[in-house]
Structure formats: structure tokens, C-alpha cells
Amino acid sequence: MKAPLKISFKNHFKSRKSNHKHKKKGKGRAPCQGWTGDEERPLAQSWLDVSEDRIHDDDQDSKTYKEKVWRNYCKCMKKNTRNPKSFYSKWRTTNRATMEFNGIYMNAIENLHSGATELDVMAKVRKICKAKVGKAFANESFGKL
């Protein structure tokens, strides 16, 4: 039997303003690591799993919800190099981009031209998304979760 995960949430979910002042700048700060697909898929899956939990559904406050998602993510990852704060920050930006992409997709489906295929729709959505946001949407694989 595996030992239970020991995760400390103390000070990880404070408001951004209070922690922003204390960040190191320049040479003393470690360089940011970009998120890989192997980290992003468990991130999205963890949020989905906790969001779709029928037992606790709406009956949890924001902090409890974030903690459950973080624990779920830690279970999915064999080697976790992230902390809860960077994890939540990444989800926030990923969620915004996904919502934007979904809105463009839904609009394209509603205005579908006769004879258009799913490939035509996705090509159109990618083009609109890139023009609107300035870069290609990187998380289409989340739709397969």
C-alpha cells in the first residue's frame, strides 16, 4: 500500500497581490519551465474529474475544490515539479483559452455552410482563433478527454 501524499497548501492559495511583492527578480529567481503536454493533459483531466464528482458537486468551497484538483493532479503525475500556485495559474490561462476557442467553435457550428465537413469547420475555427488571439490554440487534445 502506498503511503498517503503529504501535501501542504499553507500559503499557496493567497491572493496574487500579497505574494507578488515577495517574488525575486533577476539572478536569484529560477527560470520558468514551460508546461509540457504530459503535464497539461493530467491538469485538464484533474479539473474535469473533480468538477464532475456527483457526490460533492456544488457542496465545496473554492479552496477545497482547488485542493482536491491539486491532489488528483499529484496522483496522476509520477514526478511533479509544480506547486499549487503555478498549477492554478496555468489552469486559469488554459481555461480562458479553451473557453475562447469553444465560443469560436460554437459560432462556426451555428453558421455552418451546406456541405461543410468537420475538417472545414475546424480549419475555419483555427484560422479565426489565430487571428483573434494572435497564436494557434494549443490544447485541442483537451476536447478528447
Image (cartoon, rainbow, N blue to C red):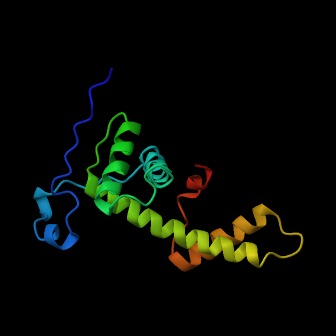
Compare residues 117 and 76 and report the one nearer the observer: 76
Measuring from the top left, give residue 20's x and y in whole percent. Answer: 16, 69
Check the picture and name the quadrant holding the N terminus: top left
| Image position of 112 with respect to 95: above or below | below
**Any part of residue 111 in sight:** yes
Along the line of sight, the residue nearer the viewer: 72 or 110: 72
Q: Could you say where residue 123 lies in the image, as x and y percent from the top left?
A: 71, 67
Percent x, y for residue 50?
44, 51
Q: How many labels does the image show?
A: 0
Residue 87 visible in the shown view? no
Is 130 displayed left or right of 10 in the figure?
Answer: right
Q: Which residue is drawn at 43% across and 61% down?
A: 58
Give the side of residue 23 with respect to residue 78, left or right. Answer: left
Task: Judge from the rendering whether residue 140 lies leftward or rightward of residue 64; answer left or right.
Answer: right
At horizontal 19% and vertical 53% (from top left) the residue drawn is: 30
- Looking at the picture, does residue 95 appear above or below residue 79? below
Give the farthest residue toward the top: 1
- The residue drawn where x is 50% and y is 51% is 54
Q: Which residue is drawn at 48% across and 50% down?
A: 53
Relative depth, front residue between 138 and 102? 102
Measured as percent of width and height from the top left, residue 60 is found at: 36, 58
